[in-house]
Image (spheres, rainbow, N blue to C red):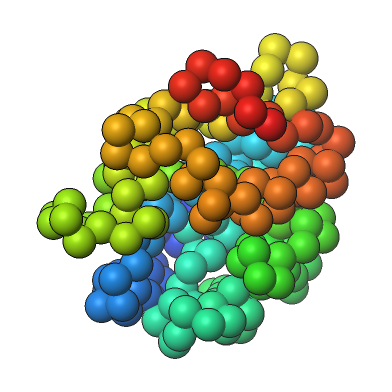
Amino acid sequence: MASFVTYKYIKQNPDIMEYIRRADKALEAQGFTEHSFAHVEIVAKNASMILTELGYDERQAELARIAGIMHDIGNVINRTDHAQSGAVMAFRLLDNINMPASEICSIISAIGNHDEGTAQPIDAISAALIIADKTDVRRSRVRNNDFLTFDIHDRVNYAVEKSSLYFNESKTAIILDINIDTEISPVIEYFEIFMERMLLCKRACAYLNIQFKMIVNGSSVL
């Protein structure tokens, strides 16, 4: 069964957009970094890019993009278990617009497996979503305007002056390349809070038969 549900269609769906907005508002009230449209659109773009660069078909890349923009809607319910609640929400939303079950399965499996507490790369879309989500670190995600009250997450994200995700020429490795202002946060603090995420990226890359590499301030660290 062919599907008319595209990323563009999802972005024009007012209900889904409202869930994304409200999920981010819930996290903002709890002091979390930005999880709104900037984040989910970056994740959608990079998840799709990963599968496209690796030669997956256009529809698989489109499903990864849809999973990317919807992956955090479960935060509107609670941060705890938001991946699982978000997957259930996504099922109902996508079923209501008559997306085929085979495609819904791919999207909700990816959403349900993206949070590091329970994440597993179970297929290409879930692997791409994990990598795209866990590598989105940047200064603009920090909401706190008072540097003196920064916690470690604020400090580490704010210290990242530049971040990019790209493949090497042979497409055998994906590289997270970041510049960190070490006067704001030492490099060790990045790994203090993000090591579990980086190891998860390695597992997701292994599923895709590629390596995960990381460059910090011009030096290879992973």
Please identify the quadrant where the N terminus is shown: bottom right
Question: Is 74 displayed left or right of 146 in the figure?
Answer: right
Residue lying at the far left in this picture: please name it: 146
| Quadrant of residue 91 within the rendered picture | bottom right
| Residue in view at x 74 percent, y 26 percent | 173
Left or right position of 39 against 85: left
At x 36%, y 41%, the residue is 185
Whether residue 54 is visible: no
Point out residue 152 in the picture as x, y percentages from the top left corner. 37, 56
Position of residue 156 relative to residue 180, above or below, is: below
Give the mark count: 0
- In the displayed structure, 121 sits above or below 62; it is below
Front in this rendered view, residue 130 or 14: 130
Up-down relation of residue 104 to residue 180 (above or below): below
Q: Residue at x 40, y 52 (%)?
A: 39
Placement of the C terminus among the 4 image quadrants: top right
- Is residue 205 something that shows in the picture? yes
Q: Position of residue 164 (x, y in %)?
A: 48, 29
118 to 189, vertically: above or below: below
Find the residue positioned furthest to the bottom.
77
Q: Residue 64: x, y in percent?
A: 63, 51
- Residue 110, horizontal then vertical, whole percent: 68, 63
**Residue at horizontal 53 percent and vertical 82 percent from the top:** 80
Q: Nearer the viewer, residue 179 or 130?
A: 179
In the figure, is residue 16 to the left or right of 142?
A: right
